Amino acid sequence: MVKEPKTSPKSSEGSTIRKRSPGRNKSPGRNSTLPTENVRKSTRPRSSTRKSQTYGSPARNNSPSRIKKDTSPAYISPKRKLPSRTADSRNSSKKAIIQQSKVDNELSESDNENIPKEKPKATVRGRTRRLELDDVVQADIKLTSDTDPLKTYIGEIRRFTRNSQAKEERVVHIKHFDTITKKLGEFSDDDDISLLSSKPSEKKQKSSILESVGTCFQIIFSQVFLTCLYLFCDNIQCSFKSFPNWNRFKSFSVFFDLRAFLGYSALAVTLAILSSVPFGGKRVSNLPSKQGKFIYVTNGFASFVIIGTIFATLEYFRFPVSRFIFEHIIQLLISATIFGAVFSVYLYLRSFYVLVSCLNPTEIDASSVNAFFYGREVNPRMFNILDLKMYLLRLRCISLILADTALLMKGLNFDANLGLTIANFDWKLVTSNSTLLILVALHFIHAVDSLCFESRSLSSYFVQYEGLGYKNAVGLLLSPFLLIAQTKYVIEYNIHLADWQLVLVSMVYCVGYMLYRLSNNQKDAFRRNPYGPGISNLESISTSQGKKLLSSGYWGLVRQPNILGDILMHVALILFSYNVPPLIGIIAIILMLIERSVISQTACKSKYGGAWEKYCQKVRYVLVPKVY
């Protein structure tokens, strides 16, 4: 047992002196003026974390055994930074405090009741608070000679409390973000095994083979169908009831003519050069997309004016361009097909050298045949200047206008030897062929509209989301020949409609055109600025992608008012065709428009989900109210 400390006699200054433990005298950093038996109290001020100063009761402070402070001049040590570790002398000082607490507890048993109980620890993570010193001062402490564990524990508490903040109520919350662990925990070994062991089923392989076969059939059928349309409807017969005289088509020159191919290629190259030059139109950016920001120069109408001027100049100098077009319609059709096929091969090959973000998501892992047919790239741009989608749209419209103009000149009996002069006009033929004039005028309205409002087409589904492959490339180049077949039929068979029929056709066409143009303008303005003038009052439905679905105005009548207007325009053209071959061309265009609406509906449903279902509940019909 450790000996009880004895009280030393009073010093000359009148202060009470008590003995200190031998361990305190051994501290190398302490200077003592008393003998070894009587150790003067340390002049170093006690730490604010000691229990006797912070939580001492009044009874203990008034106890006669308490030691009063020494009034002698104290040695003031310079301030130093809080050490990360406590010296051995500090531990021995703490030992003396505990011994003195033992003496006080024996002299005054009532002090045990006043010792504050241990308070519950904070439930949040933070630095150690001062109240943790309560674990050291207990009522029933039994000192033994083996105090090393106690000294170690006191040293740890001392180290924590000295590094605590001055304000006791402050708690620093520490947040642990185990993001890597959470991400790793989202995948298990079973997932890896299933991914490695997953193989395409036989059913999927069979379906992909069937899709490839169907795609090949579409590639062949589209060309054969359009060629047969011209073979079965010529100046001799126009019906599918009897076969034409095949002896007339034995020659290879009937289907391919080098001059026709070079002429069509010259038109395509000229338009590509004009479309690459930034002139004749305003600069417009596309809507935000994952492909990035593109700048378009909408100079389609200016390009048409230049090409039309070249065409008129050649006619003026007696180059029979219009007569050549009329006599080589089939050769020009084959030339457009060859040009479109070569163009599609170029699109397919270049798609392997572009960024993944530029590809069509539905055709990335598709078969080679399907990827070639539907297109892998969404917005291909040649040399980052010429947008190929807009280029094909312009080529379709300009070729339709040039071909219809050539057929009109043939129908009005223009003499190629006289050229395009006033003397070559026969005004009686102009007034008598009102059916031909109105038909060509209706074709012109649709084509010129597309050239004048090019910027509106940038918000269309075709420009934003569809891939550009054989289907769209060749389809755009061959679509003028479906309408040209009708014009050729009216000229060769001298079709005349009554005046009331012409008025009815014009009215239906104008209604369809207004619905088509106004709905496209409304959608484009809403996509670019939903809060613009005249648009902000329209109702819309928010989606999870940050976009809004326009659910009022023209888009509150049906879900696809622009396609409905386009269908009405082509329905009005049916009256110009009494026989099946030219009629099939118009019906084919209407079926393609219906197919486009179905594709758009499916894509929007998978993209917008619940917002699209809510829109469908509000706008119930796709094209025709009360019908579909």
Image: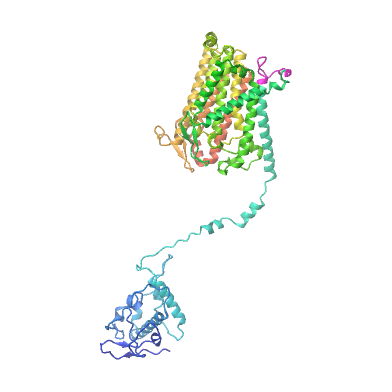
> Is 86 situated left or right of 62 in this image?
right
- Total numbered labels placed on residues in the image: 0
**411 to 353, vertically: above or below:** above
Image spot of residue 121 (x, y percent): 41, 69
Image spot of residue 331 (x, y percent): 65, 22
Q: Quadrant of the N terminus?
A: bottom left
- The quadrant in which residue 390 appears is top right
Q: Main secondary structure of the magenta part?
A: loop
What segment carries the magenta color?
A: 230-247
- The quadrant in which residue 317 appears is top right
350 and 85: which is toward the camera: 350
241 falls in the magenta region: yes
614 and 197: which is toward the camera: 197
540 and 160: which is toward the camera: 160
User: In the displayed image of the protein, which residue is found farthest to the left?
Assistant: 13
Picture colour scheme: rainbow
**84 to 195, vertically: above or below:** below
What residue do we see at 57% from left, 43% from top? 355
What residue do we see at 48% from left, 59% from top? 177
Q: Is residue 307 visible?
A: yes
> Is 607 situated left or right of 49 in this image?
right
- The quadrant in which residue 597 appears is top right
380 falls in the magenta region: no
Q: Is residue 577 visible?
A: no
User: In the displayed image of the protein, which residue is found farthest to the front?
Assistant: 317
> Is 449 situated left or right of 65 in this image?
right
Image spot of residue 564 (x, y percent): 52, 27
**505 to 271, vertically: above or below:** above
